[in-house]
Amino acid sequence: MAEESAPPDTADEVRHALSAPDRRWSGSALLVFPAAVGELLAWLEDDRNFSAAHHVDAFRSAIREYRTAEQEGLGFSVAAVLRTHLGKVSTALQQLNPAGNRAVAITAVQDLQSALKDQQVLQAAWKDLWSKCSKLETSAEAIAVRRDLFLALARLAGHDLGQLASTLSDVLADTAWAVTGVRTALGDLAPDVLDENEHELPRAGLKTTERATLCERVLALPPAAHSHVVWLAYEKASMFLKPIASLGDITFIMSEYVPDEATAASAKYSSYCMHWTETDGEFLADMPHKVGTVLARVFLPPRIYADPIAVARTRVEALVMVGKFHAGMPAGCWRILPGHKHIPNGQRGEERRIEVSSYTVAPLDHGRQAAIYSEMATFWKQIDGTVAIDDAGLAEAVELLRWWQAAEEQSSLAQVIANVRVVETAAARVGTAPWEDHLAAYLKPTWVVQAIHEDLVTTIRHAASREPTGLTVQAYKRRQAVRDATLDFHEFGYIDLVPGSTQDALTEFIDIYPPHHQMARRLRTLAKRLDNRDAFEKWRAQLETRWGRLADRMARTRNAITHGGPATAEVVGSIAAFSRQMGAWEVQIALESALAGTGLIPAHIAFRKDSTTLLERMRQAAKPGDVIHSSAVPPHPR
């Protein structure tokens, strides 16, 4: 929490934007520009025999993605630095004949991709981010796009995002030792100027604009080569009689034998692992210690890694997947757990807590598990005497459900294939239109409504529960009071919003958060959209555009995967959640149709009508928020 006299400024807001650099802020509908460039190049370099019947639409789709990312994703400064390269790509795409020679277009896009690694481009992205954060009228969404582009370019240039973000954040905070260290690295100060007491000085005394300029200069320094240690964990795993084993730079440790004290952990394992540090012992002692959990320590020798955590994860996962394949073991074995611990250059780095699955460590939530049986009993009563359990319609609905559930634990690529299969099957039963058109006809309104509701719910939840950075003590106390009136905490950690509480909470939170705060921007943007019909209409149109991009990308990706075409990891990952939601709604409609005996077409029409009716009520209301608040989190009935 901040002192009463120190409200956040632009530097504080940019510091917040640099936190958790591996997490994306902007929505998945807009590809970050480097990803759009990579996807376009993948299609241009596709060496399959060109099919006028199947590939023209895919090329057009990839080009649309690129142009959208250029127009909406690049800030003024970045676009100015890249103007020549962007112009060459634009000309090449205008003249492109996908069925003919693509060499000119390939060269232009490759040159652009190389130019994205230039330090001048990264510095320009920094200027664009700073400019957006300096203006109070900038929306949180606009800042998110600039922030994600800056971090993507930094990664592309070879920077360790954790270290770079930490350095920039310390300079923006005007920390004396960080400013001195950076100025020494830049040659402004001689190395002997460094004072051992520098760490005790609270501030360097730089103005906000001077700190921003110093950060921009830091970005001109080439990324340094560092070694890295990354800790990962696997559940449902064992090495049986081998409590520790090494495969090159990768060491596997059965966690049940690990002491829970750092010194003891170091004493036991340091001799088995390359370049062990005290931090290794601290991390290892803090890792999950449970039967069936294997820990993996990956040492990466000194070099420039754009994303050392991803490199480490890829190396271990490759070994694990090959091992499971040759052993004939199911996919559920040796399953990697979320989270990691990172030691860059021997220093304590980023931690994302690793926890074994709740079903293996947490007390059994009997109520939640019993709810499954209750739903089974309810379902049985619904079909008793009306629909047989092996009824053709119900059997097909259950089969779709099986596909949809099976996709949940698969890779993003497998999820997309399985979920689209659910959609395609449902679309084929409804009519002859392509499944992409089927989605637009029946599910698009529900997606728009859900996006509106989700924005309200997540914004209020985050305003109530996120870290109180930038809040004064008094503001924090006020937030806690609103939080207590807004959030309903359940046993086993489930959190709901109190029905009917969001309208007052939104007003209160806007007054609590200071203007230069990312949360304040989100709240102001949301309030404007809920209170003003014109702002709401603009928002609704933006959501429909985002829908179109996601649906178009999903169709292109599905076809590419199915027919051996290009499918870049970032693009596939960006539509996994969208494909899952589409599949879930199709399963819901199929089950309701089978139980009611109405047929899939009437069921789809009824599903669409519910959302179109609600959306029309929002559009006609003097204040759309009156409808949105009550429909997203309905008040208790009187």
Image (spheres, rainbow, N blue to C red):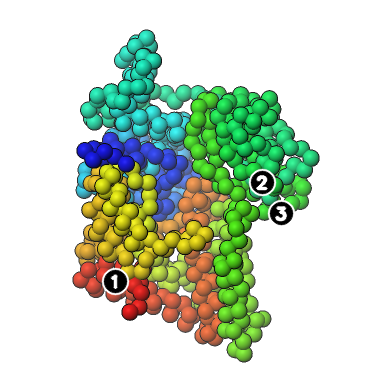
Q: Which mark's residue is nearer the viewer, 2 or 3?
A: 2
Q: Earlier in the sequence, mark 1 or mark 3?
A: 3
Residue 361 at x, y percent in the picture:
62, 53
Label 1 crowd (10 A; few <14 / some 14-19 / many >=20):
some
Look at label 1 and name its amino acid.
Val
Q: Which label was assigned to residue 459?
A: none
Q: Which mark's residue is nearer the viewer, 1 or 2?
A: 2
Look at 72% across and 47% down and name the residue there.
Answer: 324
Look at 76% across and 46% down and name the residue there.
Answer: 326
Look at label 3 and name its amino acid.
Pro
Q: Which label was assigned to residue 290?
A: 2
Look at 37% across and 9% down and name the residue there.
Answer: 192
Look at label 2 and name its amino acid.
Lys
Label 3 crowd (10 A; few <14 / some 14-19 / many >=20):
few
Q: Earlier in the sequence, mark 1 or mark 2?
A: 2
Camera-side residue: 62 or 631? Answer: 631
Q: Secondary structure at mark 1?
A: helix
Give the residue number, with chain letter if any, for mark 3.
330
Q: Is residue 544 visible?
A: no
Give the residue number, with chain letter if any, for mark 1.
627
Residue 590 at x, y percent in the picture:
54, 76
